[in-house]
Image (spheres, helix red, strand yellow):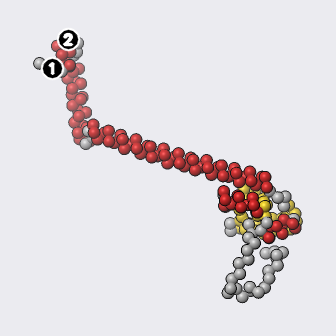
């Protein structure tokens, strides 16, 4: 007595037998192809869940990367502000040599600024391919944020090696190399 809806509609004359046969044939083909692929309803939901989890992980990684880039930008902005607020007018006619990576650079400074650089009271920093001279405290704060920005910050400590044959000879502060 239980007949399918399709059969009931055909008996009432609301459907076409040829169309019903074509639809049944199409459904059968889909079931056979799904069986060959090994993807049943449970398998397809599992694959969809895995894809969703992978997308969530990619989004999480992308958000972490964007957050890190924003933090780095904020640190660079803080460093730039520190340099702008505390830079020392250094321009003079005494050449002061320092290293920038593997290159030896020369900055022309005044006598007082040279003495501060030698004694460790001032430092040379680099931002946007420009060199600036800042006080020691500002350089220490800059080094906490972006260490690669500080190129020269002399310390007051004298490290003497016991095996050094020249340890008894004093090196003059105004020695230019």
Q: Which residue is mark 2?
A: 13
Q: Which residue is mark 1?
A: 3
On the question of residue 128 being in view, the answer is no
Could you tell me residue 160's position as x and y percent?
71, 81
Q: Residue 156 sits in which quadrant?
A: bottom right
- Element on which disc 1 rests: loop
Could you tell me residue 53's position as x and y percent?
40, 44
Q: CA distance from mark 2 to mark 1?
A: 15 Å
* Residue at the image position 77 percent from the left and 68 percent from the top: 120
Mark 2 or mark 1: name the one nearer the start of the chain: 1
Q: From the viewer's perspective, is 24 left or right of 83?
A: left
Q: Residue 41 sits in which quadrant?
A: top left
* Residue at the image position 36 percent from the left and 41 percent from the top: 49
On the question of residue 132 being in view, the answer is yes
Q: Nearer the viewer, mark 2 or mark 1?
A: 1
Q: From the viewer's perspective, is 164 left or right of 108?
A: left
* Residue at the image position 78 percent from the left and 52 percent from the top: 85
Could you tell me residue 50's position as x and y percent?
37, 44
Query: Could you tell me which quadrant the N terminus lies in?
Result: top left
Q: Is residue 37 above or below residue 145?
A: above
Crowding at dot 2, Cα within 10 Å, few <14 / some 14-19 / many 20+, comes out as: few
* Residue at the image position 84 percent from the left and 75 percent from the top: 174
């Amino acid at each position: 007595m239980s007949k399918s809806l399709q059969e009931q509609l055909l008996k009432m004359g609301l459907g076409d037998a040829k169309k019903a046969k074509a639809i049944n044939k199409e459904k059968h083909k889909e079931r056979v192809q799904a069986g060959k692929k090994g993807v049943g309803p449970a398998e397809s939901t599992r694959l969809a869940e895995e894809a969703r989890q992978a997308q969530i992980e990619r989004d999480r990684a992308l958000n972490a990367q964007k957050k890190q880039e924003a933090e780095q930008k904020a640190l660079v902005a803080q460093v730039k502000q520190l340099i702008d607020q505390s830079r020392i007018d250094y321009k003079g006619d005494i050449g002061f040599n320092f290293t920038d990576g593997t290159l030896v650079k020369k900055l022309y400074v005044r006598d007082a600024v040279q003495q501060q650089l030698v004694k460790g009271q001032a430092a040379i920093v680099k931002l946007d391919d420009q060199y600036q001279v800042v006080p020691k405290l500002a350089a220490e704060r800059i080094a906490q944020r972006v260490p690669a920005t500080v190129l020269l910050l002399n310390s007051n400590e004298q490290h003497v090696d016991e095996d050094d044959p020249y340890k008894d000879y004093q090196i003059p502060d105004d020695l230019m190399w």
